[in-house]
Image (spheres, rainbow, N blue to C red):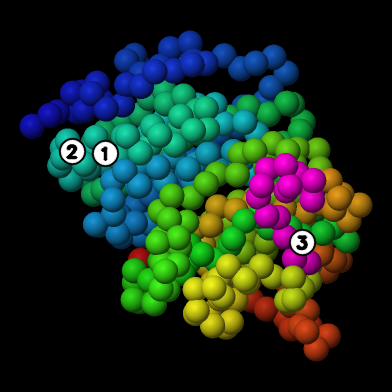
């Protein structure tokens, strides 16, 4: 059975392209480019809370890297380096090998050097820390929205939630099940979109705990309320699965694990955002606007406004 150092040597030592010293010493060495600020984020994935015991290790490796890289994208920054710390019940080398391959594949796709980490014995738990760079003073934060800004969401939010429901509830999705499971297990960090929105988005984050819940973070930090236009919600991809409008709307507004970018921008920037969407081949939907006050309202087709709860996923008030 391979030990800790053998596992690291065999599976965690990957080539680097912009790192002074990678895996193999007590710590890695990196040099920031002139004029850059360092962006740092950590995310932990725990078995039974964030993934099922039978999860495919390659896909789990990909997702562990992706959700961290997504946090850097949400700051309009460029991801550059990442570390991975593992707690494992046993040194299952085939499992670790597949995990490492998936993790490295995601890092390679987004130009991120894997520069270190740790392994230890314990309940299965994966914790990555990603480091990025952004020109000083240009990071897009959560507290920059202004009253009257448009609210935008990228991609197809809600599909990951339907994929999870297909696993936990045997929800029937027909020919769309695999697509939904792919969005759940292999999310795409919107790095290119985040970089394109630098200097254009006024506030931004990635949707991990549900659209409404994450929008509430922007509103709270910016001291604003919001109106969501029900008719503008991108429900079409979800309705194709046959789940019905009510379930589709619930998945879109309350589902998590999308890692799409939710952002605000001045109304006059709509044309530039449409151009970015076309250039990237990525749908970006304008779904509402911010307003003075607090809380979130849904503008219904009848013209009535309904106040809604904006509670997102809370790890200490939820069941696995």
Residue 76 seen from this side? no
Give the Cα separation between the discs numbered 2 and 3. Answer: 45 Å
Q: Residues within 10 Å of mark 2 (few under 14, many from 20)?
A: few
Q: Is residue 50 left or right of residue 4?
A: right
| Location of mark 1 (residue) | 98
Q: Pick the quarter of the image with the N terminus.
A: top left
Secondary structure type for disc 3: strand
Residue 58, above or below 151: above
Magenta-drawn stretch contains 227? no
Label 3–label 1 contact, CB within 8 A: no
Residue 277 on the magenta span: yes
Which residues fall within the magenta stretch?
Answer: 273-288
Tell me if residue 266 comes above or below residue 66 in the rendering: below
Quadrant of res 25: top left
Q: Secondary structure at mark 1?
A: helix
Q: Position of residue 275 (x, y in %)?
A: 79, 46
Which residue is at a point 31% across and 30% down the rendered structure image? 118
Q: Which residue is mark 2?
A: 94
Residue sitting at x 41%, y 30%:
83
Disc number for residue 180: none
According to the picture, the residue beneath numbered tag 3 turns out to be: 286
In the image, residue 92 lies at what x, y percent? 16, 40
């Amino acid at each position: 059975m391979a030990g800790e150092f053998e596992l690291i040597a065999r599976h965690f030592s990957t080539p680097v392209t912009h790192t002074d010293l990678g895996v193999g010493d007590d710590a890695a060495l990196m040099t920031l480019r002139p004029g850059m600020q360092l962006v740092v984020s950590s995310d932990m994935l725990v078995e039974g809370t964030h993934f099922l015991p039978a999860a495919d290790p390659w896909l789990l490796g990909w997702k562990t890297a992706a959700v961290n890289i997504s946090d850097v994208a949400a700051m309009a920054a460029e991801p550059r380096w990442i570390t991975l710390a593992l707690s494992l019940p046993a040194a299952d080398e085939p499992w670790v090998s597949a995990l490492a391959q998936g993790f490295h594949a995601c890092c390679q796709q987004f130009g991120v050097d894997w520069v270190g980490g740790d392994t230890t014995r314990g309940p299965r738990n994966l914790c990555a820390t990603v480091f990025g760079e952004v020109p000083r003073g240009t990071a897009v934060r959560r507290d920059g929205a202004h009253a009257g800004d448009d609210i935008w969401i990228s991609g197809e939010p809600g599909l990951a939630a339907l994929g999870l429901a297909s696993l936990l509830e045997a929800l029937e999705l027909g020919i769309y099940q695999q697509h939904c499971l792919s969005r759940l297990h292999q999310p795409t960090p919107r790095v290119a979109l985040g970089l394109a929105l630098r200097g254009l988005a006024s506030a931004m984050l990635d949707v991990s705990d549900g659209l409404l819940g994450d929008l509430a973070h922007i509103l709270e930090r910016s001291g604003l309320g919001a109106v969501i236009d029900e008719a503008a919600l991108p429900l079409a991809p979800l309705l194709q699965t046959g789940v019905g409008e009510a379930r589709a709307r619930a998945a879109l507004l309350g589902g998590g694990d999308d890692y799409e970018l939710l952002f605000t921008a001045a109304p006059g920037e709509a044309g530039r955002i449409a151009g970015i969407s076309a250039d990237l081949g990525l749908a970006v939907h304008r779904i509402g606007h911010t307003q003075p006050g607090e809380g979130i309202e849904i503008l219904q087709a009848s013209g009535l406004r309904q106040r809604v709860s904006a509670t997102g996923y809370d790890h200490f008030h939820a069941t696995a």
